[in-house]
Image (cartoon, rainbow, N blue to C red):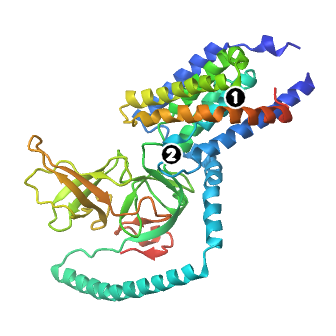
C-alpha cells in the first residue's frame, strides 16, 4: 500500500489553476447565456434546507414574541382591525356597485370585458439574498403554476416580479433592484414613464422625463400595463423630490415605493386577467 | 491503514457539518444596517480546515462551498466559487507558516485573506459591469478578523473531539 503522500497526484497549484479557470468559465456562461437556469434551480432545491434552517431563528423569535403579547394590546389591536374591516366593507360595497356599473358601461362601449386578476398568497422565506441586490424568496413555486415574470404585490402595491423558479420556491426581484424597471403612468394625467430601481429599499429613480413634463411631487405612479408583464392600474410609487437642473436635459426625479417592501411577510402572487381559469390553482383571494 | 481511512471518513463528516453551519450563518437574515458587517463565516471555517487539515480540505472543497454560496445567494454563479478557491489555495500553500503564528497574528492574515476574497468579488462584478457598492464591501474583512480567535478556539475543540486529521 502506498502512503497518501505518494498518491497526491495532481499538484495543488495545478488543481488551483483548474478550479480558477472553471470558475471564470462558469461566471461568463452564467452572465452571458441561459444554459445554467435548469441546473441552478436544481441546486437551489438542494440548498433549500440551509435556507429553512437560516430562517428558523427569526420564526422562533416572532413566535416567542407572540407568546408574550399582553391581552390589552391584543384587545386594542382587535378593536382597530374590527374598525378597519368595517371601513373596508363599506368601501367594498361601493366598489361592487362601481364595478357592475363599469361593466355595464364597457358593454355599452363594446369594449372587451376585463377579467379579474387572480391571486395566491405566499410567505417570504428569505430576504436580501445578496448584498446590493433586492430580492426575496417565497414559499410557492412551479408546482403552484407560478411562472417567470409573474408580478407579485402586497396589500399596498406592486412589489416586483418572479425571476427564478424551483418546484417549491421562487425568487422575486423587487422593483427596487438596480436591474429592475416598471412601465408606469402618472395616475393624475396618464403621463407614461419607466421607473427604475436603485438598490436602496426606499428609493426609485424616474429618468427620461423632460422639464416640460407635467409631473408634481406627491403624484401617484401606477402600472401602465405596457410591455404586458404587469397588469394595469396597480399603485407602484409616489413621486418624491423633483430636481430640475438647467444644465441637464432631463429631470432628476426620485420616488418612494408604495408597497411595504421591508415589512411584508406575506405577499400575493397574481395572475393577470385573460388566462384560462382551469389553468389556475385554487385561488385564495381575488385581488381585483 | 483501514482504521485511518475510517477515521478520515469520520473527519470528513465533521468538516462538512461545520461548513454547512457556516453556510447557514451566511444566510441568516440580518437587519439592513447590519448586513454589511456580516463576517464571512464560510471563509473563516474554510481557512481553519485548510490550515489544520490541508490533506483533507483544499481548493476543491473551496470551489464546491463557494458554488453552494453562489446558489444560496442567487447571485452570479461562480463568483464566490472563484473567491473561495483562491482563499483555499493561499491558506493551503502557506499553512505551515500561518500555523506558527499566534492567534492574534493569524487574525491579521485572515483579514488579508478575506480582503482578497472581497477584492475578487468586486473584480468579478466590475468586469461584468455590475455595480457593487462602496467601501462597505471591505467591512467583512474587519469583522472576520475580529471573529477569527473565537472561530479558531471553537473549531480546534471540534477538531480534537471529532478526531479530524
Please state which of residues A74 and B62 is positioned toward the viewer in this rendering.
A74
Depth check: A147 or B44 in front? B44
Q: Quadrant of residue A19?
A: top right
Q: Nearer the viewer, residue A36 or B104?
A: B104
Q: Is residue A39 visible?
A: no
Q: CA distance from mark 1 to mark 2?
A: 23 Å
Q: Residue A236, how many percent across, how many down?
A: 31, 62
Q: Nearer the viewer, residue B7 or A250?
A: A250
Could you tell me residue A70's position as x and y percent? Answer: 60, 78
Counting residues from the N terminus, which is met first, the one under dot 1 or under dot 2?
A: 2
Q: Which residue is mark 1?
A: B48
Q: Is residue B17 left or right of residue A19?
A: right
Image quarter where the N terminus of chain A lies is: top right
Q: Which quarter of the picture shows residue A13?
A: top right
Q: Residue at x 10, y 56 (%)?
A: A213
> Which quadrant, please, contains the C terminus of chain A?
bottom left
Residue drawn at 44 percent across, 57 percent down: A147
Q: x and y percent of residue A251 in the render?
A: 15, 49
Q: Is residue B140 above or below residue A153?
A: above
Is residue A71 rendered to the left or right of residue A275? right
Q: Secondary structure at mark 1?
A: helix
Q: Which residue is mark 2?
A: B35
Is mark 1 in CB contact (under 8 Å) with mark 2? no
* Residue density around tag 2, few if under 14, some if 14–19, many if 20 or more, within 10 Å: some
Label 2 marks a residue whose chain is B
Instruction: Please tell me whether residue B130 is drawn above or below residue A189 in the rendered image.
Output: above
Residue A170, image x and y in percent? 50, 54
User: Would residue A107 appear left or right of B38 to someone viewing this image?
Assistant: left
Q: Residue at x 71, y 28 (%)?
A: B49
Q: Quadrant of residue A232?
A: bottom left
Q: Classify residue B153 as left or right of residue A12.
A: right
Amino acid at each position: 500500500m502506498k502512503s497518501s503522500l505518494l498518491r497526491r497526484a495532481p499538484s495543488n497549484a495545478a488543481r488551483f489553476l483548474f478550479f480558477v479557470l472553471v470558475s471564470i468559465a462558469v461566471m461568463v456562461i452564467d452572465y452571458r447565456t441561459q444554459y445554467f437556469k435548469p441546473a441552478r434551480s436544481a441546486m437551489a432545491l438542494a440548498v433549500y434546507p440551509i435556507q429553512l434552517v437560516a430562517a428558523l431563528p427569526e420564526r422562533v423569535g416572532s413566535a416567542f414574541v407572540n407568546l408574550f403579547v399582553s391581552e390589552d394590546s391584543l384587545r386594542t389591536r382587535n378593536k382597530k382591525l374590527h374598525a378597519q374591516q368595517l371601513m373596508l366593507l363599506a368601501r367594498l360595497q361601493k366598489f361592487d356597485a362601481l364595478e357592475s356599473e363599469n361593466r355595464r358601461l364597457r358593454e355599452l362601449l363594446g369594449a372587451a370585458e376585463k377579467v379579474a386578476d387572480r391571486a395566491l398568497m405566499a410567505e417570504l422565506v428569505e430576504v436580501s439574498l445578496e448584498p446590493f441586490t433586492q430580492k426575496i424568496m417565497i414559499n410557492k413555486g412551479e408546482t403552484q403554476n407560478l411562472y417567470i415574470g409573474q408580478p407579485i404585490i402586497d396589500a399596498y402595491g406592486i412589489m416586483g416580479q418572479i425571476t427564478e423558479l424551483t418546484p417549491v420556491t421562487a425568487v422575486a426581484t423587487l422593483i427596487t433592484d438596480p436591474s429592475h424597471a416598471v412601465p408606469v403612468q402618472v395616475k393624475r394625467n396618464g403621463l407614461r414613464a419607466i421607473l427604475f430601481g436603485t438598490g436602496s429599499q426606499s428609493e426609485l429613480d424616474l429618468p427620461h422625463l423632460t422639464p416640460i413634463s407635467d409631473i408634481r411631487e406627491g403624484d401617484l405612479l401606477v402600472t401602465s400595463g405596457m410591455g404586458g408583464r404587469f397588469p394595469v392600474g396597480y399603485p407602484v410609487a409616489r413621486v418624491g423630490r423633483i430636481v430640475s437642473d438647467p444644465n441637464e436635459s432631463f429631470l432628476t426625479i426620485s420616488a418612494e415605493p408604495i408597497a411595504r417592501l421591508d415589512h411584508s411577510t406575506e405577499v400575493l402572487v397574481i395572475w393577470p386577467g385573460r388566462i384560462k381559469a382551469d389553468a389556475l390553482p385554487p385561488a385564495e383571494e381575488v385581488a381585483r | 491503514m483501514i482504521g485511518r481511512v475510517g477515521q478520515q471518513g469520520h473527519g470528513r463528516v465533521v468538516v462538512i457539518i461545520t461548513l454547512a453551519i457556516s453556510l447557514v450563518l451566511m444566510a441568516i437574515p440580518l437587519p439592513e444596517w447590519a448586513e454589511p458587517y456580516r463576517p464571512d463565516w464560510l471563509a473563516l471555517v474554510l481557512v481553519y480546515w485548510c490550515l489544520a487539515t490541508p490533506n483533507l480540505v483544499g481548493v476543491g472543497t473551496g470551489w464546491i462551498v463557494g458554488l453552494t454560496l453562489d446558489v444560496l445567494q442567487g447571485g452570479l454563479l461562480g463568483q464566490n466559487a472563484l473567491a473561495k478557491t483562491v482563499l483555499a489555495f493561499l491558506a493551503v500553500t502557506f499553512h505551515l507558516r500561518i500555523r506558527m503564528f499566534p492567534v492574534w497574528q493569524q487574525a491579521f492574515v485572515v483579514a488579508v485573506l478575506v480582503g482578497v476574497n472581497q477584492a475578487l468579488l468586486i473584480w468579478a462584478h466590475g468586469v461584468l459591469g455590475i455595480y457593487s457598492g462602496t467601501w462597505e464591501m471591505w467591512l467583512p474583512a474587519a469583522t472576520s478578523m475580529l471573529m477569527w480567535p473565537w472561530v479558531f478556539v471553537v473549531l480546534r475543540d471540534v477538531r480534537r473531539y471529532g478526531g479530524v486529521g
